[in-house]
Image (cartoon, helix red, strand yellow):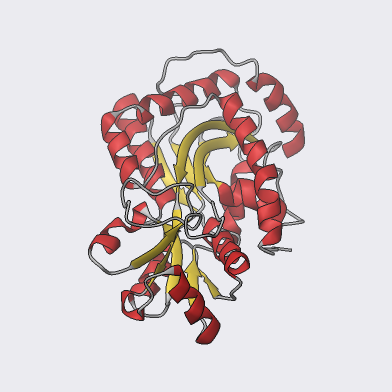
Amino acid sequence: MKHLLALGAASLLFAAPAYAEPGKWTDEPVRIVVTFPPGGTSDLIARVLAQYFESEFGQKAVVDNRPGAGGTVSADFVADQDPDGTTLILGNNAPFTIAPTQFEDLPYDAMADFTHIAYLGASTPALFVQPSSGITSIEDYIERANTDGITYGSSGVGSITHILGQAVDVSLGIEQIHVPYQGSAPAIQDFRAGVLEAYYDMVALNGDLITEGETQPIALASPERSPLFPEIPTFRELGHDIVIENWTGVSGPAGMDPEMVQTIHDTIEAIMQMEPVIEQLAKFGIAHTEMTSDEFTTFVDGAITTWAPLIKAANVNGG
């Protein structure tokens, strides 16, 4: 049924009007499904959207956190919902870019079973270690991993932070011990409790911990340094060509009405242009880039192809 709906959605989406008035698109409350538990970047972004959907446009919206299996639990749930605009997903690399290569028996098709509506932006992950560890450079990290071993936390099997951890293993020639969590918040909690020696997470989400000296950033997985923390070097400038950024966008089930899709897209765009939202997303390390729904659909399709060799090289296999 998913695939039959998708064929109709694809043809309708390209027929969508070029412009629509932003505003309320359904009389029912909208559920924004998030692939991780409360507290992470995706959750915070979803809550910003839900807040402004209602306060600015009268569209009631709630955040529905459904973590598990690298975001595939949420994505599969959304793919099976009615395409009436009442269920959306705050999508990211995990269920749409990583999972199609990671899982052989994925219960949904990342393209055919969804209507990709609006691109929001991307955030950058980094490697963090205990400040008391004595590790202050990538060379220190390699030495510690090869002598005593290092245990790191990620936001889940198949998540972008897991892929980054595996890519670091391959590029640095080390073998870290991976401990997956259901989201970054519980991983950071264990790190602060001294359970973990290191973790990978979005740099902007850890701003307070960095400034308060509660975590030691080692390297960013971005093409260039972060304007928020320009003192943190990138893996690339340290001699390791590791660039992994986590994109975020809004999607819905396949078969959504094209006029509704355009309204949702333009409502999101209007919100993303608001100064308080720009400032809030900047704190998450996200700078918005506008795309049409068609462009976002093409972007997701291209990301699957681009990431496939990286995922295979990192040897992350979900079966």
Percent of width and height locating residue 292 = 54, 24
| Residue positioned most to the bottom | 148
Relative to 301, 21 lies left or right: left
Q: Residue 111: horizontal and vertical position, in percent?
A: 68, 37
Question: Eyeballing the image, is 169 above or below 268?
Answer: below
- Vertical side of 277 occupied by 304: above or below: below
Residue 185 appears in which quarter of the rendering?
A: bottom left
Q: Residue 112, position in %: x, y?
A: 71, 36
**Residue at 62% over, 46% down:** 96
Query: Quarter holding the N terminus?
Result: top right
Q: Residue at x 70, y 50 (%)?
A: 308
Please count the marks in the image. 0
Percent from the top left, x then y, of residue 236? 51, 55
Residues 288 and 189: in front is: 288
| Left or right position of 59 against 256 | left
In this view, the residue farthest toward the left is 212
Which residue is rendered at x = 50% and y = 38% of the image?
Answer: 249
Task: Note whether residue 83 is visible.
Answer: no
**Image quadrant containing the C terminus:** bottom right
Judged left or right of residue 293, residue 128 is left
Q: As drawn, is 58 to the left or to the right of 142?
A: left
Given residues 241 and 244, the one toward you in this image is 241
Front residue (pair 177, 26): 177
* Residue 197 seen: yes
Question: Which quadrant of the figure has residue 219?
Answer: bottom left
Q: Nearer the viewer, residue 279 or 112?
A: 279
> Which residue occupies 63% across, 41% down?
303
